[in-house]
Amino acid sequence: MTSTIPVNSLSRHIAPLQDALSDIAAAIIASGYYVLGPNVKAFEQAFAGYCGAAHCISVANGTDALELSLRALGVTEGDQVAVVANAAMYGTSAVLACNATPVFIDTNVDDGLMSIQSLQAALDSGAAPKAVIVTHLYGKLADIEAIVTLCHGRGITVLEDCAQSHGATRNGKRAGSFGDIASFSFYPTKNLGALGDGGAIVTNDAQLAETTTRLRQYGWSAKYTNSLRGGRNSRLDELQAAMLLHMLPLLDGWNTRRREIANRYAAGIRNPRIVVSGPAGDDHVGHLYVVRSSARDALREHLQAEGVQTEVHYPVCDHRQPCHAGAFDGVRLPNTEADAVSVLTLPCFPELTDAEADQVIAACNRF
Ligand SMILES: *Cc1c(COP(=O)(O)O)cnc(C)c1O
């Protein structure tokens, strides 16, 4: 093999932006304003507008965005929060940080997204969550309209985790505009990624916007006046905000290219031992292209030998993580558990060429 096709390449992604981002960095360094300044404000406005939401509150990372959103929704010690168990502990960690209890909900067989039947069953059998975290995993919008209807009918709030789904759209509405509040991550590998950590909370609710704005800066209502408990330092800096502001107009084009690659895989991979993800419409921004195989580990070795790098998102279910010390040993999530041993992520990023995608397809078809 000549060279390995990477599962993702940030150097290829950022190379065309190198000069522009360097100029932006130089201007910020000279400006004397480094945290929560004019670029942060401008990016928050632009991103709220992009998402079709009234407010955007930037924070330090996506995990803080989840946790501060839960706190703003009033989640506190002893509360339950419903969450999927196949999303690398992000949502679950935020629940635990609030001293609340995760109620794990199983996923759909075909797409790894929260199963509304499983959520309904949990509610019918006595679970009483204060909030539900809906993760739009792999870049695809969950059954979010129906979940919001179900939850609001029972007085349960909905937090959308959009860390993998920036820009996904259904019926003219974007990820982050369906529930009560939404969280985003701008970690470098995300569809919209900074050159460091970053995150945001998006909401149409003025009160939630006000509360999260305070929580991200020590719980201040005014400088040095700490009015809210649970506050911390979770601010975005000017460098990251300015880079994100530069990249935001490029997001839709990147998503279109990710979708093209996903659809190339969906159409081209023909192997009875590999279950492909269906073609991606506007509600899927191709963050990760995932296939399933009962011979996953052998497929992974085969692809590695053929020069195709892969990854597993994610190998350990939340309810089986060692940090819980057995607290969820009785929990059974058949679809989630099946995915952990069968999912495999193929290379999918905007700069992947058609020729590379075709090599990946050929390698899969030779398995
Ligand atoms: C990346 C990610 C997060 C966490 O974001 P960080 O910025 O890394 O804290 C949360 N949820 C999902 C689904 C993610 O993919």
Image (cartoon, rainbow, N blue to C red):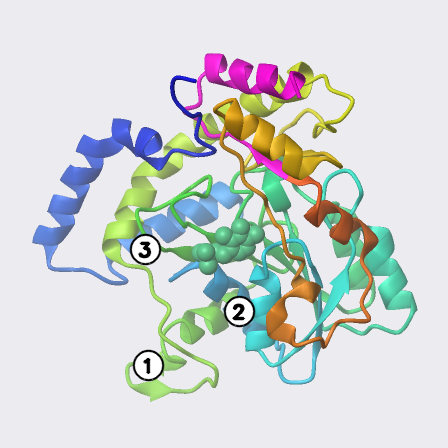
- Name the residue that disc number 1 marks: 222
Q: Vertically, is 103 above or below 74?
A: above
Q: Residues within 10 Å of mark 1 (few under 14, many from 20)?
A: few
Eye-nearest disc, 3 or 2: 2
Kindly identify which residue carries mark 2.
Answer: 67
In this rendered view, identify the residue nearer to me: 264 or 325.
325
Q: Residue at x 82, y 71 (%)?
A: 330
> What amino acid is at disc 1?
Ala
Question: Would you say 90 lies left or right of 44 here?
Answer: right
Residue 351 higher or lower than 177, as above or below: above
Q: Is residue 44 left or right of residue 303?
A: left
Kindly tell me whether residue 88 is visible in this rendering: yes
At horizontal 73% and vertical 40% (from top left) the residue drawn is 111
CA gap between label 2 and label 1 equals 22 Å
Q: Earlier in the sequence, mark 3 or mark 1?
A: 3
Q: Which residues are magenta?
A: 344-367
Q: Secondary structure at mark 1?
A: strand
